[in-house]
Image (cartoon, helix red, strand yellow):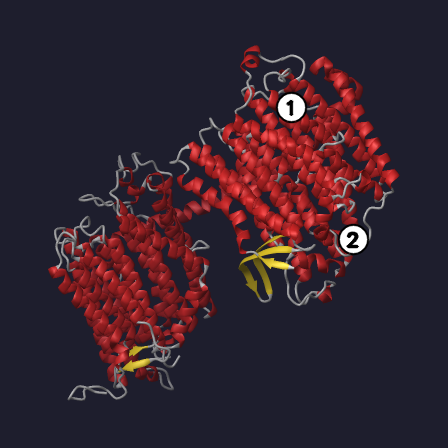
């Protein structure tokens, strides 16, 4: 059922080619050519992904498209191929990356129109798209890691895109460093699996496959046969990697700071695609994670707590992008909760709908920021409905979608997660999820009202100059708004008379053999009841926030009063950053300071300088040897010959 | 079989064995005649003809599956491999000289035929199974190169280089010839097959060792090993840049090929009997070369000393004396030729009529002015330092590894420390290109890179080819490594 399709490689190659061209000629051709090139390579990749998608839809269930590009590593029976694979799971990711990616590229041509470093921006953005596609199309952990690191690099480069601003440059650095922690765990997990699957490892409690491989299919197939401790350790290590890339507790701290990057970057990388890489990885390795129930429990709880914690922080933020950033952390938490209870399909569904509406929210936020000349504080906004009608309308759609209002995309995917959690008997998780949903509805309504309704509160001149963004920016908004509504209908549950088309399309890729039996079994009545409860909670919460924030930002005082001491914690993001600063950053800084001043400067540098000085003196001597006089040279030749002869004759016959 | 009335041929002589050499000499004569009649204005046509001839010889000079002999000339895997290397490297060096001959003061057309004669001589050196024939090849090559070094007729330094090289070369040849005579006195033949037998029950005789030592003095001069290296910086600097590039790659490769066949393989006892002097010479060569390169402001002179340093690394293979080390030596020669030619080519890019740009400071600002050339130069410098994943890295790893396997731990430590030292001046070039301002005081007001450089398409192409070869050899070394192993395996008796 694997069909070889050698054109698959062009999906990641085209954006890479775009990036290379931007670097090579970007500074010579004009902005227009750069923009067209950047968008068209991603657009063509999208068309290729569509072609793959249609091939998979018409193919029998469980079909896989594969492209063996070349054998990368071949050592004693251990092979790593550069092999790209599209099955139902990765093709959905590909469509999201290239589709939403294309829209964001188009949007960026407008958003970045006045930036001096236009070509560099699109070089990074294209490079990111390429790396992300490698990540999802890889058929083994090692190749996935290439993409994983590639997107991390681009994320770093783009967060610090305006590198002359020290704060922005350090935000990029922070993202990079925090991600290193996760990546180290990812690598350790990979090594552990390599060791476990290596030939001859069976006496150590691992299975013997005869030949080692780190292909996902092999890992998933072999996982049930490995010792439970080993599988759990590997699964947890990989999950720590996921918490880094997907901003979960305890490694989420970089994402809010990552908002320092240009807003399209926040939309593409830090909302729609890269941050879902961890979710994708767990779904890809569903067989491994299913074989580690303890790890699954950890994932579910980490996800749920992250979802709730980040939502509480979202309530008290005043920077429009920070609200959305914590909202992203929270929504990613939902996805991990779904993974943890085994609802891989629901998690991927939410990845997709989240890409639509969160991408849209960020782009809308960008449009607002653009209109107000870099103003990001929502207390300085208000009443933008009239000035920016398209932004307003699309932002409102996205708000309703993320809040979970029935009929929009977020409702279906969030409901699928909550239903799966309930069906699995995880009532505690379900309750947390519900609370998170209420908070989401609350902070999103607050955001919508403070930005677009009532009257403008900021600097009057700014308010008068506010204008709708150019069409290159509004058209992507409209397309994403349509998707934020329509996207949900790919997964209408059976209880509502739907067929869950996406769920059954994904099923062959995300349900391992062990899992096939226990699909969720909720009676129609219970499912209806759950929907009713969540809808009531969401609508109630929205109504409450709407009324409360009629008073404008001053209503924050009410919230603050009601929350008491908890407000302090929420405002400081539960003091996680502070804890890192105290427990890790400062002690390490002190240690590094010692090594630098005492060891490096005092010891190593002195030694090295001494060596360099000696070398310099000797160099001068040898240089003089080359006097330029031919007699002198002949003499040296003769002396050398005599020395050699003497050595030979005096050395004696051996 | 034999069309000649006189039977001058040794029994079993096969014309196929000498055909590549005959083609090479015929090409040289042909180009010489063509050059005389070629219109002066379009003389670069002669250059293209030379390149075509070299590529054809590279193809014609391939070894048949079964080695063939014509008396003291062998066409086996080894000479076939060397023919390919010498011709391809020479072709690349001709390509880079097409645009730059006049700028470098070479106005005479004999450049191309002389270069072909030198290549033909080098091919004889690699194919010879007799010391006298090897010596003939060496002299053929040397004579041509003596003249080539002086091709910048109107320049004093070029003349000086030519004369110096000639005088000292003659001196060194005398040593070599004397060594061959002494070996003949012991073996009763100059045939290489007889040399292995010189090591009897109780080792070798003093005269044998003396002969080998004097032979090595001659080789030491040609490969520029300490203390016979003093000519190299002056000659490299004085000779026109295209000739220098040719000397540092083709001439050096030919000398090492001959050294490999006639000493390393034919006299396996040399590595044992002369171990200490060889060891000291290798260590001294790399150390002196690197230390002297450290303080050079002239890029050309720096590359000359760098070439001495690399001779030191290569000489380790002779110390080790194993076939793995010999294979690594062949591989190293190929990788070294690519990265060195690339470096010389970038230097030539900067030269302008009457304004040679041969200082490191002339590179200042090249990163902005010619990003592609600067990138190629960076690749070559990193490869010369031995940074993965480039060709120079694989070459060093395989050579150092082979020497390590032979048990010479201290020598490898010396070589690794030397590599660290070399990074200082190779990276200095990169710093100059990217971090030094083209108009800064350090660059002497205005570096060559800040000038509007004339367009030199052939040179640009050769820069890219060299850099590409460096990268490819590094990324996929197996074909070249495999072929050098096969080349060695084909030498009779090994």
Residue A393 — which label? 1
The residue lying at 51 percent from left, 28 percent from top is A110
Is residue A294 placed above or below B148 in the rendered structure? above
A580 or B117: which is nearer to us? Answer: B117
Q: Position of residue B325 (x, y in %)?
A: 41, 69
In the figure, residue B476 lies in which quadrant?
Answer: bottom left
Work out whether residue A583 can be spotted: no
Is B442 in front, or is A399?
A399
Q: Quadrant of residue A401?
A: top right
Secondary structure type for disc 2: loop
Looking at the rendered image, the disc whose residue lies closer to the viewer, 2 or 1, is: 1
The residue shown at (70%, 14%) is A552
Residue B370, given in percent of the width and then of the height, sits at 33, 42
- The residue under label 2 is A515
- Could you tell whether A192 is left or right of B368 in the image? right
Circle 1 residues within 10 Å: few <14, some 14–19, many ≥20: some
Above-or-below relation of A23 to B111: above
The alpha-carbon separation of the residues under discs 2 and 1 comes to 42 Å
């Amino acid at each position: 059922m694997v069909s070889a399709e050698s054109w698959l490689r062009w999906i990641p190659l085209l954006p890479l080619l775009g990036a290379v061209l931007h670097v090579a000629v970007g500074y010579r051709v004009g902005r227009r050519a750069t923009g067209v090139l950047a968008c068209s390579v991603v657009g063509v990749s999208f068309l290729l992904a569509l072609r793959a998608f249609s091939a998979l839809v018409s193919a029998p269930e469980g079909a896989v498209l594969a492209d063996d590009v070349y054998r990368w590593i071949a050592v004693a029976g251990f092979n790593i191929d550069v092999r790209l694979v599209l099955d139902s799971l990765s093709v959905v990711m590909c469509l999201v990356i290239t589709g939403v990616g294309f829209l964001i590229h188009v949007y960026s041509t407008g958003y970045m129109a006045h930036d001096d470093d236009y070509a560099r921006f699109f070089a990074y953005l294209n490079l990111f798209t390429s790396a992300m596609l490698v990540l999802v199309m890889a058929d083994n952990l090692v190749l996935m890691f290439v993409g994983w690191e590639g997107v991390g690099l681009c994320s770093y480069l783009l967060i610090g895109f305006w590198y002359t601003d020290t704060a922005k440059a350090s935000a990029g650095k922070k993202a990079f460093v925090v991600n290193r922690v996760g990546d180290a765990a990812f690598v350790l997990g990979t090594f552990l699996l390599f060791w476990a699957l290596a030939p001859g490892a069976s006496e150590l409690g691992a299975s013997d496959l005869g030949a080692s491989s780190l292909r996902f299919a092999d890992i998933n197939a072999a996982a049930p046969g490995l010792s439970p401790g080993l599988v759990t350790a590997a699964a947890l290590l990989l999950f720590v990697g996921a918490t880094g890339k997907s901003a979960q507790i305890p490694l989420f701290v970089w994402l809010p700071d990552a908002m320092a990057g240009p807003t399209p970057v926040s939309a593409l990388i830090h909302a729609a695609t890269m941050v879902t890489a961890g979710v994708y990885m767990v779904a890809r390795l569903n067989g491994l994670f299913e074989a580690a129930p303890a790890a699954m429990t950890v994932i579910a709880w980490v996800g749920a707590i992250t979802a709730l914690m980040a939502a509480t922080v979202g309530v008290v933020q005043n920077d429009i992008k920070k609200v959305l950033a914590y909202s992203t952390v929270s929504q990613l938490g939902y996805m991990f909760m779904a993974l943890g209870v085994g609802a891989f399909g629901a998690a991927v569904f939410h990845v997709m709908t989240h890409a639509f509406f969160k991408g849209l929210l960020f782009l809308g936020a960008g449009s607002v920021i653009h209109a107000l000349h870099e103003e990001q504080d929502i207390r300085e906004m208000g009443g933008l409905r009239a000035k920016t009608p398209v932004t307003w309308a699309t932002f409102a759609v996205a708000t309703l979608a993320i809040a979970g209002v029935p009929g929009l995309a977020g409702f279906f995917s969030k409901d699928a997660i909550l239903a799966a959690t309930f069906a699995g008997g995880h009532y505690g998780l379900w309750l947390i999820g519900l609370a998170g949903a209420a908070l989401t509805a609350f902070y999103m309504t607050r955001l919508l009202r403070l930005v677009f309704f009532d009257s403008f509160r900021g600097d009057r001149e700014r308010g008068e100059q506010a204008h709708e963004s150019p069409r290159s920016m509004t058209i992507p908004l409209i397309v994403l708004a349509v998707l934020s509504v329509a996207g949900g209908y790919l997964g209408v549950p059976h209880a509502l008379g739907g067929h869950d088309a996406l769920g059954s399309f994904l099923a062959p890729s995300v349900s391992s053999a062990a899992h096939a039996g226990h699909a969720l079994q909720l009676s129609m009545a219970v499912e209806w009841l759950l929907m009713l409860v969540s809808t009531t909670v969401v609508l109630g919460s929205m109504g409450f926030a709407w009324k409360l924030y009629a008073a404008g930002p001053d209503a924050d005082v009410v919230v603050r009063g009601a929350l008491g001491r908890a407000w302090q914690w929420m405002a400081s993001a539960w003091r996680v950053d502070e804890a890192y600063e105290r427990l890790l950053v400062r002690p390490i800084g002190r240690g590094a300071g010692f090594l630098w001043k005492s060891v490096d400067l005092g010891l190593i540098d002195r030694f090295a300088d001494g060596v360099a000085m000696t070398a310099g003196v000797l160099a001068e001597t040898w240089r003089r040897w080359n006097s330029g006089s031919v007699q002198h040279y002949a003499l040296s030749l003769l002396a050398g010959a005599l020395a050699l002869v003497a050595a030979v004759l005096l050395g004696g016959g051996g | 079989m034999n069309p000649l009335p006189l039977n001058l041929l040794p029994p079993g002589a096969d014309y196929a064995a000498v055909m590549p050499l005959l083609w090479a000499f015929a090409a040289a004569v042909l180009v010489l005649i063509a050059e005389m009649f070629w219109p002066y204005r379009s003389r670069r046509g002669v250059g293209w003809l030379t390149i075509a001839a070299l590529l054809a010889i590279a193809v014609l000079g391939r070894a048949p599956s079964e080695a063939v002999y014509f008396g003291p000339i062998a066409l086996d895997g080894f000479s076939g491999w060397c023919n390919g290397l010498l011709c391809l490297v020479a072709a690349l060096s001709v390509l880079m000289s097409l645009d730059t001959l006049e700028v470098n003061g070479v106005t005479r057309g004999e450049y191309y035929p002389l270069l072909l004669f030198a290549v033909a001589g080098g091919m004889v050196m690699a194919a010879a199974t007799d010391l006298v024939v090897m010596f003939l090849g060496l002299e053929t090559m040397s004579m041509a190169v003596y003249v080539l070094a002086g091709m910048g007729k109107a320049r004093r330094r070029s003349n000086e280089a030519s004369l110096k090289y000639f005088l000292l070369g003659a001196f060194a040849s005398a040593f070599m010839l004397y060594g061959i005579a002494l070996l003949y006195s012991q073996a009763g033949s100059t045939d290489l097959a007889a040399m292995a037998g010189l090591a009897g029950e109780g080792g070798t005789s003093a005269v044998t060792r003396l002969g080998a030592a004097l032979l090595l003095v001659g080789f030491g001069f040609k490969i520029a090993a300490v203390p016979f290296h003093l000519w190299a910086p002056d000659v490299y600097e004085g000779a026109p840049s295209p000739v220098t590039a040719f000397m540092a790659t083709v001439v050096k490769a030919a000398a090492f090929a001959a050294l490999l066949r006639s000493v390393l393989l034919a006299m396996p006892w040399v590595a044992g009997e002369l171990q200490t002097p060889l060891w000291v010479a290798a260590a001294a060569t790399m150390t002196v070369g690197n230390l002297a390169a450290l303080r050079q402001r002239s890029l050309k002179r720096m590359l000359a000393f760098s070439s001495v340093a690399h001779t030191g690394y290569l000489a380790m293979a002779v110390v080790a004396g194993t076939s793995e080390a010999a294979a690594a030596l062949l591989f190293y020669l190929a990788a070294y030729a690519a990265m060195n030619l690339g470096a010389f080519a970038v230097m030539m890019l900067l030269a302008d009529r009457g304004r040679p740009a041969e200082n490191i400071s002339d590179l200042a600002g090249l990163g902005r002015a010619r990003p592609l050339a600067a990138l190629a130069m960076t690749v070559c410098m990193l490869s010369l330092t031995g940074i993965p994943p480039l060709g120079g890295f694989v070459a060093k790893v395989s050579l150092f590894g082979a020497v390590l396997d032979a048990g010479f731990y201290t020598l490898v430590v010396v070589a690794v420390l030397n590599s660290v030292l070399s990074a200082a001046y190779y990276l200095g070039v990169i710093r100059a290109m990217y971090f030094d301002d083209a108009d800064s005081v350090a660059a002497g007001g205005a570096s060559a890179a800040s000038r509007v450089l004339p367009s030199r398409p052939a040179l640009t192409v050769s820069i890219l080819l060299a850099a590409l070869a460096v990268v490819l050899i590094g990324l996929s070394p197996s074909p070249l490594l495999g072929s050098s192993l096969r080349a060695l395996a084909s030498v009779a008796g090994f």
